Each structure stands twice: as structure tokens, then as C-alpha cells.
Image (cartoon, rainbow, N blue to C red):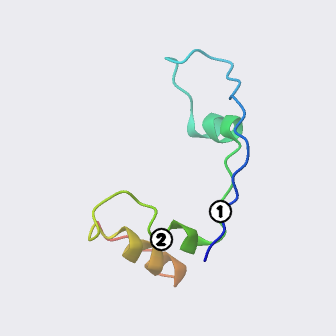
Amino acid sequence: MKRLNIRRIEPVASPRSFWEPASIDELIKEQRVEPVNDLSVLYGSWPGESDDGFEEAIDRLRHGDSKIRR
């Protein structure tokens, strides 16, 4: 059984309006996104079709195959 830690989500303070686009780096900083260290936490979390290749792509990345097949 896996344990899921849930923490309180604080509102994101943004220096721009909702309709003003932000760069990826700005969004990462504002939303306090952290890298995923354990890719196994992504298994079963993708809302796509069961045969969409997501899990296989993660498995290849975990085992050193950096080539993503599209």
C-alpha cells in the first residue's frame, strides 16, 4: 500500500494577470514545482488510454533508454 502525502495548497501569487502568458521557468518558480525523483509514482496516474504508451515510456526512461517513441 502506498501512502500519499497531501499538504495545504496556498494560493499562487502572480505578478501578472490571468490572461498574460508566463514562461515555463516563471510557472515553475510560482508553483514551487519540484523534480520527480521516483518515476514509479507516475505509474497508473496518467488519465490516458491504457495502451497509450505512457507507462512504457516511463519504464524506458527508468532503464536508461532516453529515446521516446512517438
Q: What residue do we see at 56% from left, 28% from top? A: 22
What element does badge 1 sit on? loop
C-alpha distance separating marks 2 and 1:
14 Å
Q: Residue at x 69, y 52 (%)?
A: 6
**Above or below, comparing residue 61 to residue 24 in the picture:** below
Residue plotted at (53% across, 79% down): 62
* Disc 1 crowd, CA 10 A, few/some/many (<14, 14-19, 20+): few
Along the line of sight, which residue is nearer the eye, 44 or 12? 44
Relative placement, left or right, of 54 versus 52 is right
Q: Give the residue at the far bottom of this rendering.
A: 63
User: For this view, does 66 lie left or right of residue 28?
Assistant: left
Measuring from the top left, give residue 7's x and y in whole percent. 73, 48
| Residue 60 spot, x, y in % from top left | 44, 80
Q: In this view, does 66 lie above or below 8?
A: below
> What's the amino acid at mark 1?
Leu
In screen coordinates, is 47 left or right of 39?
A: left
SS assignment at label 2: loop
Q: Which mark is residue 43?
A: 2
Quadrant that contains the N terminus: bottom right
Marked residue nearer the N-terminal end (2 or 1): 1
